[in-house]
Image (tube, rainbow, N blue to C red):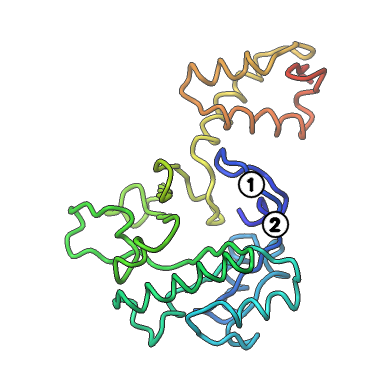
Amino acid sequence: MLSYYELGIDILGHKTNRVEWAYIALEHSLEETYRACQRVGVLDIIQHRLFGAIEDNIPDVPNLNNALIRTRQRFPDVHLIVLDGVAGMVNDGNINDFGSIKDMLRDIKTACQQKDLTVIGIGLDAKSSNPSQWVPYRQRPSGSGAWGQYSSTIFIMERENPRDIFDKGRRLVIEPRNAGSEQHKFVLDADGKLQNAEDQDADFLLDSQLAHWPSGTIVLTAEIILIGTRNALAKRSVERWITNCVEAKRLIKVSRGKYKVA
């Protein structure tokens, strides 16, 4: 996702702007973070933009000043900061205290407005004593309800089947403050990367269709989208499949919206 921000590529159907970003590991050492990134194959994307709270002398404080100073020394134009372990910035470490979290989030919002920043904070989902009891997503972050009340957007990643520890299905729930909620389904691949479940369905169906088209067949974007729509595929998944086929030279672009089967 961060590489998409860097290139200005749409994410989950939403337009993005190109932006310089930095990732600050507040909970783990740089070595631990490097190993985790290498395991899932994203170290080359994140390594040169990764900061460590210990290694880069970024103390736990309830504001962004120290973090911003360090990151902008290396990246003067940084406008997106990811705080991995944002709960560590809560004053006195009391993540259950409404007032402490409220003050920290207000400080972050002030810094964002004054310094043209966006901040993504990564934390934990709350444990539930009764897994069968549904809890509104804005109340899910571990600790006080202030997380949901004073955050602009809440992202929750959860297993499709919470009772199955081997379940590879994941559901991403997006709860913006001033827009409708969204849900997106993913699947963990063998490397631990999230793959869009809808994209996998699109690949299987449309690859089968492509195999039936003789070489030289002319196909239109509208035709391919219609095939996808009839099979309950999202338009963005079909468009992504077309783009990938053109890059792989399985489809040759003739003109706008018109392709030839290679």
Q: Secondary structure at mark 1?
A: loop
Residue 14 can be seen, yes or no: yes
Q: Which mark is residue 24?
A: none
Q: On the picture, is 134 further left or further right than 203?
A: left
Residue 203 x/y as whole percent:
58, 31
Picture mark count: 2
Which quadrant does the C terminus fall into?
top right
User: Residue at the spot x=51%, y=19% of the render?
Assistant: 229
Q: Residues within 10 Å of mark 2 (few under 14, many from 20)?
A: some
Q: Say which quarter of the image contains residue 56.
A: bottom right
User: Residue at the spot x=47%, y=81% of the render?
Assistant: 62
Q: Nearer the viewer, residue 88 or 231?
A: 88
User: Residue at the spot x=64%, y=46% of the render?
Assistant: 16
Q: Is residue 63 above or below residue 235?
A: below
Q: Say which quarter of the image contains residue 156.
A: bottom left
User: Residue at the spot x=35%, y=61% of the render?
Assistant: 148
Q: Which mark is residue 19?
A: 2
Q: On the picture, is 127 further left or further right than 25?
A: left
Q: Say which quarter of the image contains residue 259.
A: top right
Q: Kindly identify the amino acid type of the residue bearing the numbered disc 1.
A: Thr
Q: Kindly identify the amino acid type of the residue bearing the numbered disc 2.
A: Val
Work out how far the residue at label 2 is from the one at label 1, CA to CA, in angstroms: 9 Å
Q: Which mark is residue 16?
A: 1
Q: Is residue 149 above or below residue 87?
A: above
Residue 165 x/y as whole percent:
34, 57
Residue 233 x/y as whole percent:
50, 26
Q: On the picture, is 235 further left or further right than 124?
A: right
Residue 170 can be seen, yes or no: no
Q: Nearer the viewer, residue 38 or 87?
A: 87
Residue 164 x/y as whole percent:
30, 53
Q: Are marks 2 and 1 in contact (CB under 8 Å)?
A: yes
The extreme right residue here reads 254
